Amino acid sequence: MRGNPPSVGYGFWKVEKDRAANLTVQAIEMGYRHLDCASDYGNEAEVGQGIERALSSRLCSREELWVTSKLWNTNHRAEHVLPALKRSLADLRLDYLDLYLIHFPIALKHVPESVRYPAGWFYDPGSVPPRMEYDPVPIRETWQAMEELMDLGLVKRIGVSNFNVALIRDLLVESHPYLVQSKLLRYCQQESIAMTAFSPLGAPSYIPLGMATTQDSVLENPVVIAIAQSHRKSPAQVVLKWGVQRGTSVIPKSSNPDRLRENLDLGGFLLTDEEMARMESLDRGQRFNDPGVFCEQAFNTFFPIYE
Ligand code: A2P
């Protein structure tokens, strides 16, 4: 069994529902073999249609694909874990996942599928003001239920996302040159934990959400631009290459086929040690995806997890 996911994956957060199926097929056709999905992204059924089309037209085999999905915050209680996975598997049209992650270390009160799917952050979006409702579920309870999914053969590996305490086998964390997390990466390497970097381009995803400005984007950084020019590559390719060369997987999102191609095309050049070090020195400890900030702004609920 493969240990780590293919180094460049396709991140589906915010990929539009009505385009997700076609983009999935196109991405697989281009050579993407790692799909990073989540029930919360609201497009798993469409990604599943794309996967089914790609597999039935033999673009690749199921074994060649690495598909990740994530358990949503409202399903942390042991009895909700298997049903949540089954819904993701049904939507994705798969009989197993390569990796299933706990999406956030945030347990929220359960919302049945019949009430709303995906449940999102609010317990009751109709209440005034709507709020998140915390449910005190120990992470161990969720983890044990995740382990049972492995025993059932429904998932090959389990892991956590958005955790900064490295307990387990696979880890998905925000990482880019403005948030390099070098100690976390070093610890993961020491413990043989695979680390996948989400938002590897540093900020563009958060600009339309009002959570970052263009100036915050790593792609606009003069050091990144200069290194990109010297290799005749785009800033995105250099930033992704840095992530791969330091030993993480990266899962950039794009809804644009040209960018999807560009993000996968990281062969034929190597960053020098000096360039790697210059990129690393851009670190500002700048986290764009921080529930301690966005839950209060967007969901009326103060919910720090990194402090
Ligand atoms: P789009 O979907 O319009 O291509 P991340 O995965 O790091 O959060 O970044 C995703 C964001 O970056 C999306 O807004 C996406 O926009 C944009 N993006 C993806 N690939 C590139 C690229 N190669 N160059 C510039 N922007 C990109």
Image: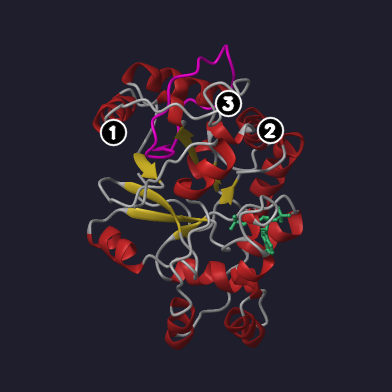
Categorize mark 3 by other alpha carbons within 10 Å: few (<14), some (14-19), many (20+).
Answer: some
Q: Which is more N-terminal, label 3 or label 2?
A: 2
Going by the numbered disc 2, the residue's amino acid type is Arg
Q: Where residue 141 sits: x, y (%)? A: 26, 27
Q: Which is more N-terminal, label 1 or label 3?
A: 3
Q: Which mark is nearer the camera, 2 or 1?
A: 1
Q: Where residue 187 sits: x, y (%)? A: 26, 61
Going by the numbered disc 3, the residue's amino acid type is Pro
Q: Is 95 colored magenta in this rendering?
A: yes
Q: Which is more N-terminal, label 1 or label 2?
A: 2
Q: Give the residue drawn at x 59%, y 36%.
A: 41
The alpha-carbon separation of the residues under discs 2 and 1 comes to: 37 Å
Q: Which residue is mark 1?
A: 139
Mark carried by residue 53? 2
Q: Give the residue drawn at x 24%, y 32%.
A: 140
Q: Is residue 192 visible?
A: yes
Residue in the foreground of this view, choosing between 281 and 146: 281
Q: Which residues are magenta?
A: 92-119
Q: Which residue is mark 3?
A: 118
The alpha-carbon separation of the residues under discs 2 and 3 comes to: 24 Å
Distance from mark 3 CB to nearest ligand 1 atom below 8 Å: no
